[in-house]
Amino acid sequence: MLIPDLVDILERSDSCFGLSRKTISKIIHDMFGTIMTTLESGEQVSIRGFGTFELRHRKARKIKGIKYQEDVILEEHHKIFFKSIRRLRTGIKGLDDSEIEK
């Protein structure tokens, strides 16, 4: 889902109190900017009723290249991990393919 899609969903929602599309977009950009800044400082971000974002360090390792099957060194890096709340996970697991919007 892209930010414009999220803006569309929120714009149709009753919880936006008549905010303009531009205002909703600014709020979303600011929210994700705050999440990124917090993660970069080494802290985790918990959003009540949604889940937790955290930055994890990944060690350097050797992998097989997809195209030529040669060994490639993947350098150490940081990766964002997200863990959703249990209610969200079980709700998604309970959906079958016919209920998921394509």
Image: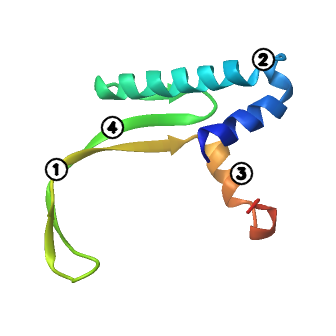
Rounded to the nearest whole Å, what is the CA distance between mark 4 and mark 1?
A: 13 Å
Residue 89 coordinates in the image, percent (x, y): 62, 50
Residue 27 coordinates in the image, percent (x, y): 61, 20
Q: What element carries label 1?
A: loop
Residue 15 coordinates in the image, percent (x, y): 81, 23
Residue 94 coordinates in the image, percent (x, y): 73, 60
Q: Which residue is drawn at 65% across and 38% down?
A: 4
> Which is more N-terminal, label 2 or label 3?
2
Rounded to the nearest whole Å, what is the CA distance between mark 3 and mark 2?
A: 29 Å
Mark 1 residue crowding within 10 angstroms, few (<14) / some (14–19) / many (20+): few
Q: Which is in the foreground here, disc 3 or disc 4?
A: 4
Q: Give above or below for 67 relative to 46.
A: below
Task: Report which residue position mark 4 lands on.
Answer: 55
Residue pushed farthest bottom?
A: 68
> Depth check: 83 or 100 in front?
100
Q: Which is in the foreground here, disc 3 or disc 2?
A: 2
Q: Residue at x 37, y 42 (%)?
A: 80
Q: What element carries label 2?
A: loop
Rounded to the nearest whole Å, what is the CA distance between mark 4 and mark 2?
A: 32 Å
Q: What element carries label 3?
A: helix
Q: Give above or below for 95 relative to 16.
A: below
Task: Report which residue position mark 1 lands on.
Answer: 76
> Which is more N-terminal, label 4 or label 3?
4
Task: Report which residue position mark 2 lands on.
Answer: 19
Rounded to the nearest whole Å, what is the CA distance between mark 1 and mark 2?
A: 43 Å
Mark 3 residue crowding within 10 angstroms, few (<14) / some (14–19) / many (20+): few
